[in-house]
Structures are given as C-alpha cells and as structure tokens.
Amino acid sequence: MPANIASALSAYAKTPTSVAPGMEARAGQDPAGDFLGLVKQAAETAIETGQKGEAASVAAVAGKADITEVVTAVDNADVTLQTAIAIRDKVISAYQEITRMPL
C-alpha cells in the first residue's frame, strides 16, 4: 500500500500547475466553495430564465409581445428546466450508486 501512495504523490507532483483559461481568479480558492458557487449560479440562472418565459407569456396574453419573442423565451425556459431535471437525475443516480458500494 505505501508504494501506491508514494507513486500517487509522485504523479500528483508531476501534474501541470497551469490553470485553465478564465479560471485564473479561482486558482487559489477552495474547490468546494467554487462548486457551491457554480451550483448557486446555475440555480439562479435557471430561475431567471423561467421568470423571463413567464413574463413573455403574460406579455403575449396582454398583446404586448411579439410571438417570436414569446416562443423563444418559453423554449429557453423549457430547455433550462429539462437540463435541471437531467442534472437532478444524475445526482440522484450517483448518490444511489455510492450508497450501494460495499464498505
């Protein structure tokens, strides 16, 4: 077992330390915080997209919106909802897989 740990540490030490483009500001931050921020931002964006779709629908009912804008906004909200559902299903599947792992 110690040989595996030593080789893992050696491999880790050889990994490049460069950061992906656009991620320079996050390089020194806590990865868990980054993930939490990413999830929070995705949820806020999904909520905002849904609200825009609802607002466009209300404007269409009032006769104040172009049908193309309404269809686009509602379609964007639908795609966002389907993406959120797919992510939720994957998270649940991963959790179930972890709980089935033998100790």
Image: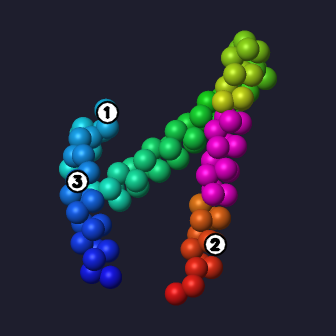
Residue 93 appears in the figure? yes
Residue 27 appears in the figure? no
Q: Residue at x 67, y 50 (%)?
A: 86
Specify start and end residues of the magenta stretch as a single range: 77-90
- Disc 1 residue type? Gly
Q: Residue at x 67, y 25 (%)?
A: 73
Closer to the N terminus: mark 1 or mark 2?
1
Q: For numbered disc 2, what is the local secondary structure?
A: helix
Q: Please tell me which residue lies in front, 22 or 80.
A: 22
Residue, disc 1:
22
Q: Is residue 27 above or below residue 2?
A: above
Q: Are marks 3 and 1 in contact (CB under 8 Å)?
A: no
Neighbourhood count class around disc 3 (C-alpha, 10 Å): few under 14, some 14–19, many 20 upward: few
**Quadrant housing residue 50:** top right
Residue, disc 2:
96
Question: Marks 1/2: CA distance?
Answer: 34 Å
Residue 14 located left or right of residue 33: left
Residue 7 drawn in magenta: no
Residue 36 located left or right of residue 2: right
Q: Residue at x 22, y 46 (%)?
A: 17
Q: Please provide percent x and percent y for residue 94.
A: 59, 65
Q: Please tell me which residue lies in front, 12 or 72.
A: 12
